[in-house]
Image (spheres, helix red, strand yellow):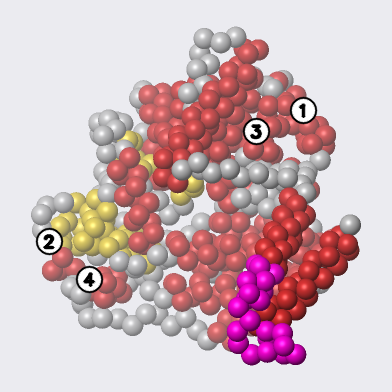
């Protein structure tokens, strides 16, 4: 095998690539004009947009995959087409992978592994994976970034930013949806995805969380074999989850849900891409999770609001669903609540007519995100990842057990996690118990924090009042006048004492220093009187 270093593939000139992007975007804009004038019938606009991104190559396929999360920006037909975008690429030569490994670790694979398979296990647009075995006998996979991909993505995103900035000047739609900010956000996400150290941190976090789990396996990273472009990870063995739909399906479905409930409500972070290709089933029926390139996060208030949304959706409580919607940050507080109430009522009415097996938390969540488009409000990215994750999770669970009630399982477990103690309550009192439990938890946390600050800093009082700035100014002015009055009084006393000695220089038989003190004191007195008179 040739182990000599290979140069990264040429990525072409920036000017040539810019011309290609501009021409393809212009062709798409022209096609859209024809479609709006009914001069073009097929394909659909969503399919045409997906074709544009696919034809532009790796960077734009990844862009489309990230945009498929943005149900707050695109209608359903666009999202369906964007979700079909896949990394259909050929593997890059093994010699280039070997060169990357040697550059990352200073040694060729022959000195790092007792076996390194030349044929990759999988290849995608940004990386490919080879199997190997270390000298200690551990079976591992070696993930290697495609040479030159970081430079290519960075160049393409810079060009796209310029194009979008130009088009925004002429398109109110692009301006309203802040297209430039969306591209910048995707660009930052891609930068993180192209740094395997970031993925390794995610892998290590989840491996630590599930290390003692009897049902979930997350293979950890080999710490001494990690760089920005190469990551070595313990290998998972098993079948894809959609290839093992067997009599163990219901139990596997419950184990997967339990893992996600733990991630949602305890860890505060979750695997954001639970499609069947990222979940394996081992011979002993353990679920193995890999590919942590997409990870969502949930802070404490969001976790509580998510639990509230699930419980409210279970109870078909329109007002509670609406409240949880605002608490999640799905809408700005300034949004029209009455209009939103109508949207939620229609959604609840639709689900009330369906059998419970057809209820979908992910679908309802996505519909709410879609409804926010009319408010020109940017839904936080972690909520968009959450919505897509719920949809993928439900689809995967139904592969394992078509009769599994995801809604009931999530609602029941969320009660335990947020300590709502709803099991023994009556249905009509569940919301009160939930809100009381949350309030109790928050008050305990706030009280603990307050006691710590009192212990460290002592007792302090802060008073807020609408007129406080004016009051503060008056206090400062009064204090200054009191100080000036005291100085003036001191000058009078000092001058009077000095007059007793009549020493020093004289002015018309009058001691000069007491005369100076009297003069200054009189001037201060005039200033005080005039200031008080003006204020009165």
Q: Which mark is residue 324?
A: 3
**Relative horizontal placement of residue 382, taking residue 325 as reference (left or right):** left
| Residue holding disc 1 | 345
The residue that appears at 32% across and 72% down in the rendered structure is: 93
Which of the 4 image quarters holds residue 489?
bottom right
Name the foreground residue: 367 vs 52.
Answer: 367
Q: Based on the picture, tell me whether residue 247 belongs to the magenta stretch.
A: no
Asked whether 462 or 84 is in front, the reply is: 462
In the picture, measured across the screen, residue 23 lies left or right of residue 252, that is right
Q: CA distance from mark 1 to mark 4?
A: 59 Å
Residue indicated by mark 2 = 114
Q: Position of residue 122 (x, y in %)?
A: 35, 57
Residue 213, given in percent of the width and then of the height, sits at 29, 33
Above-or-below relation of 55 to 139: below
Q: Secondary structure at mark 2?
A: strand
Marks 3 and 4 sit apart, C-alpha to C-alpha, by 49 Å
Q: Which tag, 3 or 4, sits closer to the chain's start?
A: 4
Query: Could you say whether the residue bearing mark 3 is in a helix, strand or loop?
Result: helix
Quarter of the image holding residue 470?
bottom right
Q: What is the crowding at mark 4: few (fewer than 14 residues within 10 Å), some, or many (at least 20)?
A: some
Q: Which mark is residue 156?
A: none
Q: Is residue 78 visible?
A: no
Whether residue 35 is visible: yes
Mark 4 and mark 2: Cα distance apart in space: 16 Å
Residue to which mark 4 is pinned: 105
In percent of the image, x 78 and y 49: which residue is there? 467
Q: Which mark's residue is nearer the viewer, 4 or 2?
A: 4
Confirm or deny contact between disc 3 and disc 4 (CB under 8 A).
no
Q: Give whichever of discs 1 and 2 has the lower sequence position.
A: 2
Magenta residues, start to end: 490-512
Q: Nearer the viewer, residue 517 or 155?
A: 517
Name the residue: 79% across, 66% down.
528
């Amino acid at each position: 095998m040739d182990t000599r270093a290979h140069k990264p593939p040429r990525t072409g000139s920036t000017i040539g690539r810019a011309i290609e992007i501009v021409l393809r975007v212009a062709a798409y804009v022209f096609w859209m004009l024809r479609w709006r004038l009914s001069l073009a019938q097929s394909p659909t606009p969503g399919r045409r947009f997906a074709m544009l991104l696919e034809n532009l190559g790796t960077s734009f396929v990844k862009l489309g995959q990230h945009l498929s999360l943005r149900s707050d920006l695109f209608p359903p037909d666009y999202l369906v087409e964007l979700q079909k975008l896949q990394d259909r690429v050929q593997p890059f030569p093994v010699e280039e992978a070997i060169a990357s490994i040697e550059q990352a670790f200073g040694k060729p694979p022959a000195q790092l592994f007792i076996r390194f398979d030349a044929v990759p296990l999988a290849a995608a647009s940004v990386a490919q994976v080879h199997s190997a075995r270390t000298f200690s006998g551990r079976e591992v996979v070696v993930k290697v970034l495609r040479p030159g991909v970081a430079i290519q993505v960075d160049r393409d995103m810079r060009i796209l930013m310029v194009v979008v900035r130009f088009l925004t000047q002429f398109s109110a739609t692009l301006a309203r949806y802040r297209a430039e900010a969306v591209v910048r956000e995707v660009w930052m996400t891609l930068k993180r995805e192209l740094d395997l150290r970031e993925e390794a941190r995610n892998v290590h976090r989840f491996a630590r969380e599930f290390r003692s789990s009897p049902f979930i396996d997350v293979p950890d990273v080999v710490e001494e074999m990690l760089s920005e472009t190469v990551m070595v990870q313990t290998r998972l063995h098993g079948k894809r989850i959609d290839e093992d739909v067997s009599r163990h399906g219901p139990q596997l479905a419950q184990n997967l849900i339990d893992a996600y409930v733990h991630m949602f409500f305890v860890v505060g972070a979750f695997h954001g891409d639970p499609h069947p290709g990222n979940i394996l089933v081992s011979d002993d029926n353990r679920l193995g999770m890999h590919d942590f390139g997409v990870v969502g996060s949930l802070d404490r208030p969001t976790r509580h609001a998510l639990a509230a949304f699930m419980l409210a959706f279970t109870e078909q409580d329109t007002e509670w669903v609406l409240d949880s919607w605002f608490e999640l940050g799905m809408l700005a507080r300034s949004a029209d609540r009455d209009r939103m109430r109508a949207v939620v009522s229609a959604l609840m009415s639709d689900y009330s007519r369906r059998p419970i097996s057809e209820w979908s938390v992910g679908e309802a969540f996505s519909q709410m995100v879609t409804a926010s488009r009319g408010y020109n409000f940017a839904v936080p990215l972690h909520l968009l990842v959450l919505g897509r994750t719920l949809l993928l999770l439900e689809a995967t669970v139904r592969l394992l057990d078509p009769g599994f009630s995801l809604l009931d399982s999530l609602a029941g477990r969320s009660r335990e996690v947020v300590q709502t103690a709803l099991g023994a309550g009556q249905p009509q009192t569940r919301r009160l118990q939930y809100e009381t439990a949350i309030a109790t938890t928050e008050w305990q946390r706030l009280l603990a924090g307050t006691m710590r600050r009192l212990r460290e800093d002592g007792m302090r009082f802060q008073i807020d009042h609408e007129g406080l700035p004016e009051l503060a100014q008056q206090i400062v002015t009064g204090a200054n006048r009191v100080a000036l009055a005291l100085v003036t009084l001191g000058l009078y006393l000092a001058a009077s004492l000095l007059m007793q000695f009549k020493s020093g220089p004289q002015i018309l038989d009058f001691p000069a220093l007491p005369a100076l003190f009297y003069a200054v004191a009189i001037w201060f007195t005039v200033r005080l009187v005039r200031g008080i008179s003006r204020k009165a």
